[in-house]
Structure formats: structure tokens, C-alpha cells
Image (tube, grey):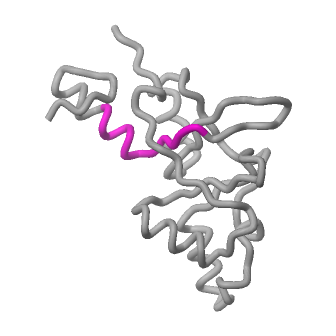
Amino acid sequence: MVELTVGQYQSVPVVLDERSSAYDALVSLFMNNIGTLFVVSEGGLLEGVLSRKDLLKLAVGNTDMHVVPVGVVMTRMPNIIMTTPEESLWMAARKLTHHEIDGLPVVKKLGEDQYEVIGRFTKTNVARAFVDIGYGYAGGEDNE
């Protein structure tokens, strides 16, 4: 049996600078039609993850999203669940379901607690893999 990996199905990451406002994050989520953003430092290192739920909590509180930085509402390191291109598709999908989250940053480790975001892995990627398996091919190719 072929071992499918995250790297075969990962998507392009959507990142946001840690100095961005919650409003900028909300616009980015909707413009990219995604549920999770990855927040990076000026040097491009993963600092946090921001979901639709995080922004909804802020909006319900009647807060001015134009002035609140994403750092106030994002989930920070070391509480971020991550994956790598080499990890099995099954293990990454298990992380999504076990932690009840929409997406994982696909990372490359650069140093002690330093990660570069190189991709995005979501429930949509899992669904794409199942469709490929159903058609008898795997590996992320678009054979339509």
C-alpha cells in the first residue's frame, strides 16, 4: 500500500504579519475563502494561528477590529498543532479531528522552537485525497 503524505496534498499557505489588525485578518480569510490564517514574524517564523472562531469571538464582543492586533486573539506557540510534508496523511487528518481544528500549518523546522510555514493542510485536503483514492490515483494530481 502506498503511504500518502501531507506533502502530496498540502495547499499554499496564507500568512499574515503579526502586526496586522484583526480586521485585516478577517478580510484575508474571506478573500482567500479559508478558515485559518498563519501569523508569522517579520522574519517569516510561525508565531500563531488565527481561525474564524477567534475572530468571531472578538467581533461578538463589540471590539473595534481595526485597532486590535492579531497577536491578541491568535493561538500562540507552543500551543499550535503542526504537521510536516513527510507526515502521513492519516496522522495529519487524525490531528485535525482529534483537536477539532480546521487547518494545520505545514512547517519546516529551522531551529529550537523555530518553524517556517511552507504549506497548509486542511479538511479540504483530506477530502481531495479521498476523492483521488476513489478514482484510483493518489498523490494530489488533478486528473479531471
Q: Is residue 122 covered in magenta?
A: yes
- Left or right position of 60 against 89: right
Compared to residue 51, the image places residue 66 above or below, namely below
Residue at position x 69%, y 46% from top? 80
Q: Is residue 137 positioned above or below 38 on the image?
A: above
Q: Is residue 113 magenta?
A: no
Which x, y percent locates residue 118? Answer: 58, 37
Q: Which range of residues does the magenta coloring cover? A: 118-129
Q: Residue 39's spot in the image, x, y percent?
A: 67, 56
Q: Quadrant of the N terminus?
A: top left
Residue at 53%, 39% in the rendered image: 119
**Left or right, residue 93 beside residue 55:** left
Q: Residue at the front extreme?
A: 43
Q: Nearer the viewer, residue 95 or 43?
A: 43
Q: Is residue 29 left or right of residue 140?
A: right
Look at 71% across and 57% down and name the residue there: 75
- Say above or below: 21 vs 94: below
Instruction: Provide residue 122's location: percent of width, then percent of height.
Output: 45, 45
The reply, left or right, for residue 8 in relation to residue 94 is left
- Give the residue at x 82% y 29%: 111
Q: Quadrant of the C terminus?
A: top left
Q: Quadrant of residue 53?
A: bottom right
